[in-house]
């Protein structure tokens, strides 16, 4: 059974920070690269960050968040995190975690709203 539970979103002013967490089941977490995806209002879901399961956790970021967001994972807790700093209004959206490439299983997501 695939379980993905995202948390940590909220309302924040531009320039602020949030830390998202995603608790995953071992079946999806253990051997997979994990990613954070976001869906802004009226837009398609896009991946903003990813981290491999091995190799010390190789990370990759979308250009729009590079230098502001940091993805990490705790393999013992089956949890992936997204530290978001210097938030901008365009970061607003629902954030999801999933494997990379993503599976058909999605959690409920966590809403991030950045006010200007």
Image (cartoon, rainbow, N blue to C red):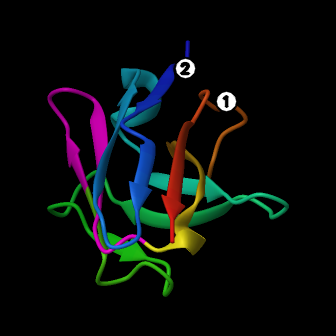
35 up-or-down from 30: above or below = below
Disc 2 secondary structure class: loop
Q: Which residue is mark 2?
A: 2
Q: Residue furthest right?
A: 42
Q: Nearer the viewer, residue 60 or 95?
A: 95
Mark 2 vs mark 1, CA separation in Å? 7 Å
Using residue 75 as the reference point, say whether residue 61 is left or right of it: right
x%, y% of residue 9?
43, 41
Residue at the top extreme, as displayed? 1
Upstream in the sequence, badge 2 or badge 1?
2
Residue 96: x and y in percent read: 55, 43
Q: Residue at x 47, y 74 (%)?
A: 88
Q: Are marks 2 and 1 in contact (CB under 8 Å)?
A: yes
Mark 1 lies on residue: 105
Q: Give the magenta range.
A: 72-87
What residue is rendered at 55% in x and 20% in y? 2
Front-most of 38 and 100?
38
Q: Which residue is depicted at the point 41% across and 21% down?
A: 25
Name the secondary structure under disc 1: loop
Q: Position of residue 84 (x, y in %)?
A: 32, 62
- Could you say which is closer to the camera, residue 32 or residue 71? 71
Q: Is residue 32 visible?
A: yes
């Amino acid at each position: 059974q695939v379980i993905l539970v995202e948390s940590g979103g909220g309302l924040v002013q531009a320039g602020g920070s949030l830390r998202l967490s995603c608790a995953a089941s071992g079946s999806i977490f253990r051997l997979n690269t994990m990613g954070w995806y976001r869906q802004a209002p009226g837009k398609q879901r896009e991946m903003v960050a990813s981290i491999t399961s091995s190799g010390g956790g190789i990370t990759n970021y979308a250009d729009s968040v590079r230098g502001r967001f940091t993805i990490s994972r705790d393999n013992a807790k089956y949890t992936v995190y997204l530290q978001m700093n210097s938030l901008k209004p365009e970061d607003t959206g629902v954030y999801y975690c999933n494997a990379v490439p993503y599976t058909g299983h999605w959690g409920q997501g966590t809403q991030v709203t950045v006010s200007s």
